[in-house]
């Protein structure tokens, strides 16, 4: 019987990856990283995890959230405002501002917000938009 290297009777050797130089380098890198992580965690301010969680909750989720102060609201007095001031109001352009001034001159000062309804071009929707921006001085 001849010895044939390709015969099935001989043991075939497979390379074991865990014994290769690349595997040794990977193991060394992982070992160094683990040791570095341990040393770093011991050198930093280490608190139990529950202390970090309570700090997070107190900062991120206060029981009574602080509300920022409301910005000062611009109030326009319908009885004293000129055309440029009236145009600062939402939905009021130059023509409608002039109509408000003309009505005020002809009919007298506005006593309620509802009086503004007598000006052509101002209806219930515009009144609702203007309500929070208008003040009325007493004549």
Image (cartoon, helix red, strand yellow):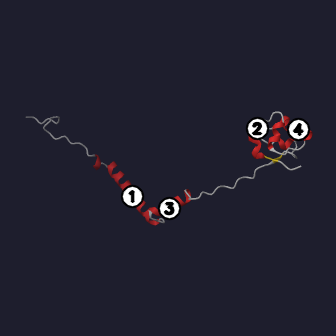
N-terminal-most mark, 1 or 4: 1
Q: Residue at x 90, y 39 (%)?
A: 107
Expressed as whole percent of the image width and height from the top left, the position of residue 65 reads 60, 57
N-terminal-most mark, 1 or 2: 1
Could you classify mark 3 by the number of other residues whose Cα lies within 10 Å: few (under 14), some (14-19), or many (20 or more)?
few
Give the label, 1 or 4, closer to the camera. 4
Question: Mark 2 and mark 4: span between their CA atoms?
Answer: 17 Å
> Residue 76, relative to residue 35: is it above or below?
above
Residue at mark 1: 34
Q: With 69 as the anchor, is 47 left or right in this view?
A: left
Expressed as whole percent of the image width and height from the top left, the position of residue 132 reads 75, 46
Q: Nearer the viewer, residue 43 or 135?
A: 135
Question: Mark 1 and mark 4: span between their CA atoms?
Answer: 83 Å
N-terminal-most mark, 4 or 3: 3
Residue at mark 2: 126
Give the label, 3 or 2, closer to the camera. 2
Question: Mark 1 and mark 3: span between their CA atoms?
Answer: 28 Å
Quarter of the figure with the N terminus:
top left
Expressed as whole percent of the image width and height from the top left, the position of residue 97 reads 85, 38
Q: Residue at x 69, y 55 (%)?
A: 69
Question: Mark 4 and mark 3: span between their CA atoms?
Answer: 63 Å
Could you classify mark 4 by the number of other residues whose Cα lies within 10 Å: few (under 14), some (14-19), or many (20 or more)?
some
Mark 4 in CB contact with mark 3 (< 8 angstroms): no
Q: Which mark is residue 103?
A: 4
Could you classify mark 1 by the number of other residues whose Cα lies within 10 Å: few (under 14), some (14-19), or many (20 or more)?
few
């Amino acid at each position: 019987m001849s010895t044939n290297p390709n015969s099935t009777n001989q043991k075939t050797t497979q390379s074991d990856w865990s014994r290769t130089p690349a595997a040794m380098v990977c193991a060394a890198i992982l070992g160094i990283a683990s040791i570095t992580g341990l040393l770093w965690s011991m050198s930093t301010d280490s608190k139990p995890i529950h202390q970090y969680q309570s700090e997070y909750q107190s900062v991120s989720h206060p029981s009574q959230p602080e509300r920022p102060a409301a910005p000062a609201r611009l109030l326009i007095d319908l009885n004293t405002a000129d055309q440029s001031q009236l145009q600062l109001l939402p939905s009021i352009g130059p023509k409608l501002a002039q109509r408000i001034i003309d009505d005020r001159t002809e009919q007298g000062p506005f006593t309620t917000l509802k009086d503004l309804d007598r000006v052509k071009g101002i209806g219930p929707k515009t009144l609702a938009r203007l309500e929070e921006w208008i003040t009325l001085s007493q004549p």
